[in-house]
C-alpha cells in the first residue's frame, strides 16, 4: 500500500500485505486472527487467550486513548503483534498513562500500520485463520516463510501451560455481593484467566483461588472451595485432556462454571466435542440469544474453537431451549450465537454447573451479560 513499506505481513498461503513498522523492532509469528472490537486494544493484547496469536484490528484507528494500568487484563502482553490500519501514540488522552506505540515497543511487541487490513481480514474470512507473521522489510520472504513453517499450528496446541501460575494464588474479596460480606470461596483452574473475570467475582464478595492448570481433582476437592470456576485461556481445548480429566472428577461434587475455554473444557468433560472455527469470533458486538427468555445480548467474544452438539452438528437450528443427554445427566442448551448459530452456553440440569462461550466480564465490551456473575454467586450460595 505504501511506497516506503518498512514491514509486511506474510501468511502461510503466501498472501502478503505491506505496511509501516511500529512498536518493537523484529518479527513475530503465530496465528493471524482479527478482532472487530472498536475499543479495548490494550485489554485485547493483554488477554492471555491471545497467546500465540497476532491480532489484526478491523477498527480504523488504534491507540487513540493511550494505555493505563487499569486496562491490563493480565501482567503482560500475550498477543505476539498488533496489525493496524492506522495507529497513534497519543499520550494526553484523559486517564492515559502512556502512548500505545511506545508501550508496544517497551514491551518488545512488533506492530505494523498503514496496511490494507480490510483486504487481510477478507482473506482470513474466506481462507480461515492461519499461521503468519509480521516481518521487517529487510527480512527476505524466504526467511519469513521458514519462520512461519517452524511455528506449530493452533489446532492441537496446549498453551495453557505457558500462561498458568506456577503456584496457588489466593485473592480476597473486593466488595460485597448479593450475599453481603459472606461470599463464597471460588477455586479456579487458571488456564490464563483475565483480570476482569477475577475482579467481577471478587467485587461480588468472593474469595478467588487461582490454581495451576495441572492441579488434580483430589487437591482441589481437599480445599475449602464452595465452587469451581473454569477460566478463559489460549490454545486448543482438545489439547487439554488432563484438565478435562480433572473436571470429570469435580462435576457433580460442587457447582462448576466456565467461561470461554472453561466452557469448552466443561463441555468436553460432560462428553461433548470441540472443533476449530474457520476464523473465530473476536470482538465486542456478537449477538447471542438466551433461548429461555428470548432476550438477545450483545456480547464480547474471543474464541477460535467451539462446541459441537451431541449429534456432531456445528449449528443449532432451533430457538427453543434444547435438552441434551451428557455423561453427567441432562444439559440444557441455553445460548446460541446469532451470527452463525454456534453453541454459546449450556446449563447442567442434574448436577450444578453452567457455562458460556462469550465473555460476560466485558473486558472490553458491552455490559449486557454482567448479571451472570450475580447469578453464579447466588447459585453457589443455594448449593
Ligand atoms: N477466550 C478464550 O478462552 C479462548 C478459548 C480458546 N482458546 C479458543 O480460541 O476458542
Image (tube, rainbow, N blue to C red):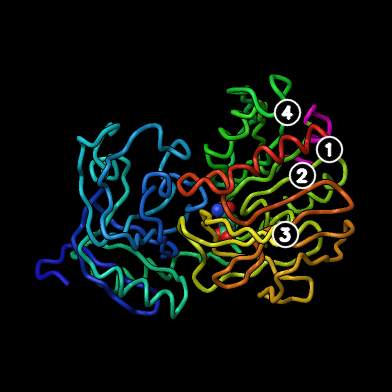
Question: Where the N terminus falls, by quadrant?
Answer: bottom left
Q: Residue 199: x, y in percent?
A: 56, 32
Q: Residue 130: x, y in percent?
A: 45, 71
Q: Is residue 191 left or right of residue 49?
A: right
**Which residue matches tag 1?**
218
Q: On residue 185, which mark appears? A: 4
Please tell me whether mark 1 sits on a helix, a strand or a loop. Answer: helix
Disc nearer the start of the sequence (2/1): 1
Please tell me whether mark 3 sits on a helix, a strand or a loop. Answer: strand
Please tell me whether mark 4 sits on a helix, a strand or a loop. Answer: strand
**Residue that appears at 25% across and 70% down:** 116
Frontmost of labels 1 and 4 is 4
Disc nearer the start of the sequence (3/1): 1
Vertical placement of residue 192 versus 203, above or below: below
The answer for how far apart the CA atoms under marks 2 and 3 are is 16 Å
The answer for how far apart the CA atoms under marks 3 and 4 are is 26 Å
Extreme-left residue of the structure:
3
**Magenta segment:** 215-225
The answer for how far apart the CA atoms under marks 2 and 1 are is 15 Å
**Residue that appears at 23% across and 37% down:** 93
The answer for how far apart the CA atoms under marks 1 and 4 are is 17 Å
Q: Are marks 3 and 4 in contact (CB under 8 Å)?
A: no
Q: Which quadrant of the render holds ligand 1? A: bottom right
Please tell me whether mark 2 sits on a helix, a strand or a loop. Answer: strand
Q: Mark 4 CB in 8 Å range of ligand 1?
A: no
Density class for disc 3 (Cα within 10 Å; few <14, some 14-19, many ≥20) is many
Q: Residue 41: x, y in percent?
A: 36, 49
Q: Are marks 3 and 1 in contact (CB under 8 Å)?
A: no
Q: In the image, is residue 113 part of the stretch drawn in magenta?
A: no
Disc nearer the start of the sequence (4/2): 4
Disc nearer the start of the sequence (3/4): 4
Amino acid at each position: 500500500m505504501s511506497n516506503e513499506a518498512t514491514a509486511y505481513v506474510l501468511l502461510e498461503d503466501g498472501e502478503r500485505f505491506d505496511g509501516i513498522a511500529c512498536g518493537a523492532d523484529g518479527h513475530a509469528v503465530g496465528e493471524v486472527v482479527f478482532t472487530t472490537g472498536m475499543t479495548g486494544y490494550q485489554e485485547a493484547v493483554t488477554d492471555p487467550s491471545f497467546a500465540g496469536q497476532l491480532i489484526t484490528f478491523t477498527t480504523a484507528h488504534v491507540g487513540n486513548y493511550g494505555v493505563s494500568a487499569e486496562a491490563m487484563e493480565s501482567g503482560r502482553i500475550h498477543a505476539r503483534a498488533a496489525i493496524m490500519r492506522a495507529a497513534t501514540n497519543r499520550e494526553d488522552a484523559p486517564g492515559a498513562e502512556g502512548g500505545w506505540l511506545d508501550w508496544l515497543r517497551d514491551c518488545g511487541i512488533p506492530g505494523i500500520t498503514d496496511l490494507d487490513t480490510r483486504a487481510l481480514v477478507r482473506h482470513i474470512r474466506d481462507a480461515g485463520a492461519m499461521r503468519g507473521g509480521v516481518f521487517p522489510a529487510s527480512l527476505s520472504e524466504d526467511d519469513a516463510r521458514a519462520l512461519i513453517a517452524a511455528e506449530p499450528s493452533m489446532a492441537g496446541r496446549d498453551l495453557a501451560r505457558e500462561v498458568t501460575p506456577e503456584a496457588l494464588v489466593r485473592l480476597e474479596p473486593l466488595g460485597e455481593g448479593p450475599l453481603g460480606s459472606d461470599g463464597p470461596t471460588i477455586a479456579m483452574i487458571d488456564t490464563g484467566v483475565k483480570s476482569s473475570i477475577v475482579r467481577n467475582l471478587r467485587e461480588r464478595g468472593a474469595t478467588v483461588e487461582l490454581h495451576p492448570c495441572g492441579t488434580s481433582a483430589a487437591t482441589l476437592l481437599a480445599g475449602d472451595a464452595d465452587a469451581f470456576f473454569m477460566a478463559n485461556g489460549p490454545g486448543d481445548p482438545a489439547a487439554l485432556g488432563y484438565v478435562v480429566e480433572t473436571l470429570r472428577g469435580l462435576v457433580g461434587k460442587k457447582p462448576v462454571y466456565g467461561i470461554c475455554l472453561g466452557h469448552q473444557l466443561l463441555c468436553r468433560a460432560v462428553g461433548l466435542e470441540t472443533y476449530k472455527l474457520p476464523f473465530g469470533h473476536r470482538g465486542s458486538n456478537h449477538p447471542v440469544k438466551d433461548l429461555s427468555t428470548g432476550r438477545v445480548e450483545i456480547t464480547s467474544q474471543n474464541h477460535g474453537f467451539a462446541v459441537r452438539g451431541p449429534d456432531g452438528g456445528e449449528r443449532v437450528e432451533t430457538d427453543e431451549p434444547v435438552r441434551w443427554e451428557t455423561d453427567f445427566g441432562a444439559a440444557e442448551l441455553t445460548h446460541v450465537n446469532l451470527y452463525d448459530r454456534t453453541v454459546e452456553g449450556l446449563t447442567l440440569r442434574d448436577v450444578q454447573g453452567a457455562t458460556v462461550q462469550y465473555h460476560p466480564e466485558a473486558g472490553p465490551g458491552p455490559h449486557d451479560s454482567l448479571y451472570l456473575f450475580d447469578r453464579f454467586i447466588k447459585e453457589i450460595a443455594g448449593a
